[in-house]
Image (cartoon, grey):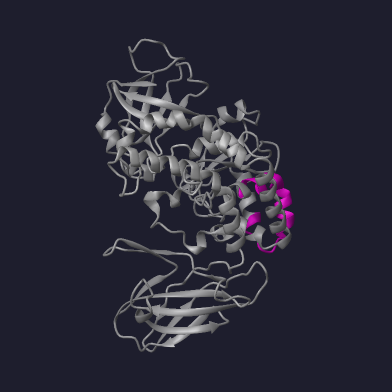
Amino acid sequence: MTVVEDESPFTLDDLLNDRLRDDDFDPWIRVHTEGETFRPDLSGSNGIMKVRGFTTRLAVQKSFRIQLDKDEVDWRGHRRINLSKHPFELTRVRNRLSFELFEQIPHITSLRTQFVNLFVNGEDLGLYSQIERYDERFLENHGLDPNGHLYKANFFEWFRYEDKVKIKSDPDYNREEFESILEIEGQDNHEKLIRLLEDVNDFDLDFDVVFRQYFHRENYLTWMAINLLMGNLDTNSQNFMLYSPKDTQTWYILPWDYDGAWGLRRQPDNLSNRYPRWQQGLATYWNVTLHKRFMMNPANLIDLEAKMVELMEQWLTEEKIRSVLAQYRDVIREFIIQPPDTHRLPLSTEVSGDPMASLAEWESEYDRITTEIVFNHNLYQTANLRPMPVHLDRPQIEDEEIEFEWNLSHDLQGDPITYDLQVSTSPSFSESSIILEIPGLTTNEYTHSNSLPSGDYFFRVLMRDTADPEVNWQAPFRSYFDQETGTSFFGLRPFTIP
């Protein structure tokens, strides 16, 4: 695909310097896009190009989207062309692999994807993945209701969000605030969505009845099982769609964005980016109202395990995964061994700059993907023996005492739980830095006399399953980044005594 910059109020350099998605700087350029279905000449622009993505905007190699003009013929059925670079993903195959596998799996949708060699103003920008956009055209092309409701989750944990999720006739309705939670891709009558959220968050209602009323059980189980088996952790509040046909109450969850799946955090360049315990197994979804209420029923967990086994035995077998990977190995290798991609691969420092060692590391990571399904299933089974994570409240500091409080945890096996409260002068919680430790608490609060001197502290609560407390323990939600050392610590909360 060839893109040529046309006369615009912004320049290509403006796009390449657009590093923040949510600020007021939103540059775009008029372009002429050339491909096999476009007019062959390069006279006149036929669309607008912008940078796309969130964290990927920080990378040198940008991802783009091109919105074609209404009078232009589409490109392979697409009027909006999403071009993803996947700059932090070494294999460059994870997204395409996922959606090709989805094509065969019942009760879930897929998206058309293809590899693209992108040229901009004559410069070869290397290999990109083009992925179909979820919109009314998608619904129509895939035999779904183009007049249905369709939302893209931006930061959506299935709360009610009364302050932002409102009907259009509400005088306080603000589309920008609404779309900070759910981006509107279908019709904008939100009454049906609000009824759904009200009932999901009504704890006086029988949740099993609510679930049967609003959700397609096989779709939900398939979506959840896929994420757990593929290790796509970034799906608890984003990277999925909500779809409901116009004349039904039923809602479906549709998959979106899997370049962070398949063990991305265990790439050679990411070995220090470890998984906190609250991102293993079902714990990663425990803060989400819908998923938490679903998991509270042991019968639902039996069905989820059965769905995972079904997928492993029929649709996500090692043979099927190897088959898809084999199709694209040579295509991708051709790009990653030459500029510009060979200089921008996320490699370990040991091989960076050595072409043969870099290729070997890419080959090894490409092959490792086939082991991820079994790895993640084993991790799921191990992690679910632990208590579920909790949130830590801010300590309440009075003249003579400090009040520590946290949520009550839950054990999926029904085992009793105890809480170990610790206060430390260091986020590492090294043995020498722990200055207060109260083990074996059975409540979710503790009051301590304020005998600590002024200064900065950290506290955490470790939940322990009393059946095997040394193995089955859990840390709280929350991360802390130490600016001085550049290190992330998990499961703690800082506080200061003035």
Please give the range of residues in magenta: 199-224
Where is residue 247 drawn, in percent x and y?
Answer: 70, 36
Residue lying at 53% horizontally and 78% vertically, measured from the top left: 419
Q: Is residue 201 part of the magenta span, yes or no?
A: yes
Residue lying at 34% horizontally and 74% vertically, measured from the top left: 426
Where is residue 26 drawn, in percent x and y?
Answer: 33, 37
Count all numbered tags in the image, as a single digit. 0
* Residue 242 seen anywhere in this rendered image of the structure: no
Q: Nearer the viewer, residue 213 or 413?
A: 413
Q: What is the magenta segment's predominant secondary structure?
A: helix
Asked if residue 12 lies left or right of residue 76, the reply is left
State which quadrant residue 62 falls in: top left
Q: Is residue 356 part of the magenta span, yes or no?
A: no
Where is residue 408 drawn, in percent x and y?
Answer: 57, 73
Q: Quadrant of the N terminus?
A: top left
Q: Nearer the viewer, residue 396 or 468?
A: 468
Where is residue 58 drawn, in percent x and y?
Answer: 32, 44
**364 versus 437 height, above or below:** above
Residue lying at 39% horizontally and 49% vertically, measured from the top left: 268
Residue lying at 56% horizontally and 53% vertically, measured from the top left: 375
**82 versus 220 height, above or below:** above
State which quadrant residue 158 falls in: bottom right
* Residue 122 seen anywhere in this rendered image of the structure: yes
